[in-house]
Image: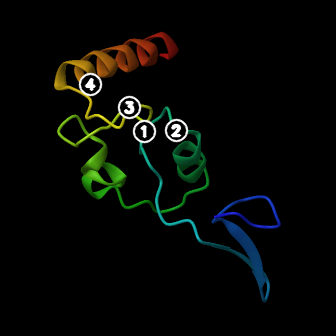
Amino acid sequence: EARDRVGGRIETVRMGEHNVDLGAAYIHGCNSYNPVYKLAVDLGVKVDQTAGGYSQGWGLDAPWYDCVSGKRVSTAQLEKASQLVGYAKSLID
């Protein structure tokens, strides 16, 4: 995804009188905590929220791996992390 410009996969190009965004295909996490999703909603962009709007591979049933050890993260660790994220979100609300 490295480019000689800012933006990674996302690039806005001019097509006639319109700006068109190229490259972006998913909003990972269609919820109020995601600023990209909030911006899309605020701008009236139609977002397909099938399966939560992103791959279901992000759930607790998905295989998660420790990026340092390469070992699979246990269900107990995932549940604890999920609880912590839920707690953090409750502080935001």
Q: Which residue is mark 2?
A: 34
Q: Position of residue 32 (x, y in %)?
A: 47, 34
Q: Closer to the N terminus: mark 3 or mark 4?
A: 3
Amino acid on which the number 1 mark rests in the picture: Asn
Viewer-proximal residue, 92 or 22?
22
Q: Secondary structure at mark 1?
A: loop
Furthest residue toward front: 69
Reading the image, the residue beneath label 1 is 31
Tags 3 and 4 touching, CB below 8 Å = no
Q: Disc 4 or disc 1, which is closer to the eye?
A: 4
- Name the secondary structure under disc 2: loop
Amino acid at dot 4: Leu
The three-letter amino acid code for the residue at tag 2 is: Asn
The image quadrant where one finds the N terminus is bottom right
Q: Earlier in the sequence, mark 2 or mark 4?
A: 2
Distance between the alpha carbons at the discs numbered 1 and 2: 6 Å
First-in-chain label (3 vs 2): 2
Nearest the camera: 11 or 43? 11
Q: Which residue is mark 3?
A: 69
Residue visible at 51% across and 16% down in the picture: 92
Observer-side mark, 2 or 4, equals: 4
Q: Which residue is mark 4?
A: 78
In this rendering, would 15 be left or right of 58? Answer: right
Q: Which mark is residue 75?
A: none
**Mark 4 in CB contact with mark 1 (< 8 angstroms):** no
Identify which residue is drawn at 33% across, 20% down: 81
Residue 67 appears left or right of 1? left
Q: Is residue 3 above or below residue 72?
A: below
Q: Is residue 13 left or right of residue 31?
A: right
- Element under label 3? loop
